[in-house]
Amino acid sequence: MSEWDEQYEKVITNMFGGLDNYLSAKLKVRRPMINQVVKHAGTVGSGKPIIECGAGTGKLSAFFAHLGYDAFAIDIDDSMLQVAKEMSDKISPTNPVKLMNADIKNIPFDDKYFSVAHSHGVLEHFSDAEIREIIREELRIADTVVLGAPSPYFAEEEKMHGDERYLPRKKWRELIVGSNANIIAETGMHVLPFHKRLQHFARHPEKIFAPKAIHLFTIKDKV
């Protein structure tokens, strides 16, 4: 079991009490991201497939497959890909996610093969130069990129305490523009479900009016 696999096992078991609760909570708070992916992927069966870059547990890819989309997901951690397979088997057994061990800096697909490339909780683990490189690579293989990254307001209990960088929105805008991309939509997401946010605010009342913990950007190539 890898370090990341162990981290997710702790989150799923200790914080949410099991996989079903974890899925329900996470899909609810990811609704803004899901809406952006669906908006740019088009109706089911009408266009290109979608891909998750840095899939982790693969919960979003499994959900999109459940909706009927042709969903791909890549990660460089085989143990996480196994978790993603289990997630796909549970959520979308009749339309499994196409999983692949691949590097998001060198995605093995042709130019514009996908309608949407999406990622969440991935890019903050890289340097500025690497982030720009990855964004350019995702825009190479997809018409639209939807990315989520933690802000400085990320809830302490959700942090993995690794190499994450909790960058302000202004910095992400600079990185995206520096990747020769246009931001066509930006918003935010909560990281915790409502009842857990109430518990968090009870411990940290000064954070009640803090901005949403996740930056969310939808981007395209500059024309």
Image (spheres, helix red, strand yellow):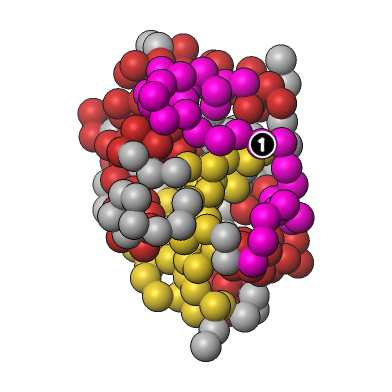
Give, as a three-letter code, the residue at label 1: Met
Q: Is residue 22 above or below residue 145?
A: above
Q: Relative to 108, is 7 above or below?
A: above
Q: Nearer the viewer, residue 29 or 95?
A: 95
Answer yes or no: is residue 45 visible.
Answer: yes
Comparing 109 with 219, the one in front is 109
Left or right, residue 9 beside residue 45: right
Instruction: Tell me the SS state at disc 1.
Output: strand
Quarter holding residue 37? bottom left
Residue ID at (48%, 66%): 144
Residue depicted at 55% across the width and 16% down the height: 9
Up-down: is 6 above or below 32?
A: above
Q: Is residue 150 visible?
A: no
Residue 184 shown left or right of residue 25 in the figure: right
User: In which quadrant will I find the N terminus?
Assistant: top right
Where is residue 49 drawn, in percent x and y? 47, 51
Indicate whether residue 113 is drawn in magenta. Answer: no
In x, y percent, where is residue 220?
49, 74
Residue 94 lies in the magenta-colored region = yes
- Residue assigned mark 1: 100
Sort mark 1 into few (<14), some (14-19) or many (20+) by Cα contacts within 10 Å: some
Relative placement, left or right, of 35 versus 105 is: left
Which residues fall within the magenta stretch? 82-111
Tell which of 60 and 196 is nearer to you. 60
Q: Give the left or right position of residue 203, taking residue 172 as reference.
A: left
Residue lying at 61% horizontally and 62% vertically, measured from the top left: 141
Q: Residue 135: give x, y in percent of width and height.
A: 63, 65
